[in-house]
Image (tube, rainbow, N blue to C red):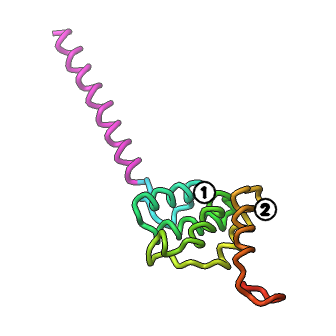
Amino acid sequence: MSSELNQIASWSLRWRIFLSGVLFLAAALASAKPFDENTDLHAEQRFQLALEAQTARDYRTMLDQLRLAATEGHAEAQEMLGMVLLTGQTLYGPAVKADRCEARTWMLRAAGQGSETAKVQLAFLNRLRGSPAGKSACG
C-alpha cells in the first residue's frame, strides 16, 4: 500500500511540475510582443534586413532599410545607399530612382567615417558633374 501511495504522489508531483511549466510558457507567450515594423532595431540589424531584402529582390524594402540604417550613422549602409542611388533603375528596377545628389550626400557621410570605397566614388562623382562652372549640380 505504501508503494502505491508513493507512486501516486510521484505522478501527482510530475503533473504539477508539467502544468506549472505549461502555465509559465503560456504566460511568457501572452506577454511577448509580436514583431512589428516599428520595433526598435539597431542600425546593423536594419543593414542586415536591407541585405536580405536585396537577396529577395525586394528593392523598395532594401532602400527603406538602407536609409534608416544610414540615417543612424551606419557607414556600410551609407556607402551601399550611395551606390544604390548611383545605379538606380539600371540594377534595381523602377523601385529605385537614380539620384546623384543624394548618392553624393551619403558617400560624403561614409567617407567622413573612413570608407575608402566612398572616397573613390566621390572622385568619380566629381568627374561626372554636368553643371556650369561655379554652379553646384546639387542645389
Q: Please check the rendered image and state whether residue 21 is part of the magenta-colored stretch, yes or no.
A: yes
Towards the viewer: 15 or 101: 101
- The circle on residue 80 is none
Three-letter amino acid code at the position of disc 1? His
Q: Quadrant of the N terminus?
A: top left
Note whether 44 is above or below 19 in the view shown. below
Which quadrant would residue 6 be assigned to in this image?
top left
Give the image location of residue 68, x and y in percent.
59, 67
In this rendering, the count of numbered labels is: 2
Per the image, the residue denoted by label 2 is 112
CA–CA distance between discs 2 and 1? Answer: 21 Å
Give the image location of residue 127, x and y in percent.
73, 74
Three-letter amino acid code at the position of disc 2? Gly
Q: Residues within 10 Å of mark 2 (few under 14, many from 20)?
A: few
Could you tell me which secondary element the residue under label 2 belongs to?
Answer: helix
Q: Nearer the viewer, mark 2 or mark 1?
A: 2
Query: Bounds of the magenta span?
Result: 1-30
Could you tell me which secondary element the residue under label 1 belongs to?
Answer: loop
- Left or right of 65 in this view: 74: right
Q: Please check the rendered image and state whether residue 80 is part of the magenta-colored stretch, yes or no.
A: no
Which residue is located at x 50 percent, y 58 percent?
Answer: 49
Which residue is located at x 49 percent, y 73 percent?
Answer: 90
- Left or right of 44 in this view: 1: left
Note whether 7 is above or below 106 in the view shown. above
Per the image, the residue denoted by label 1 is 42
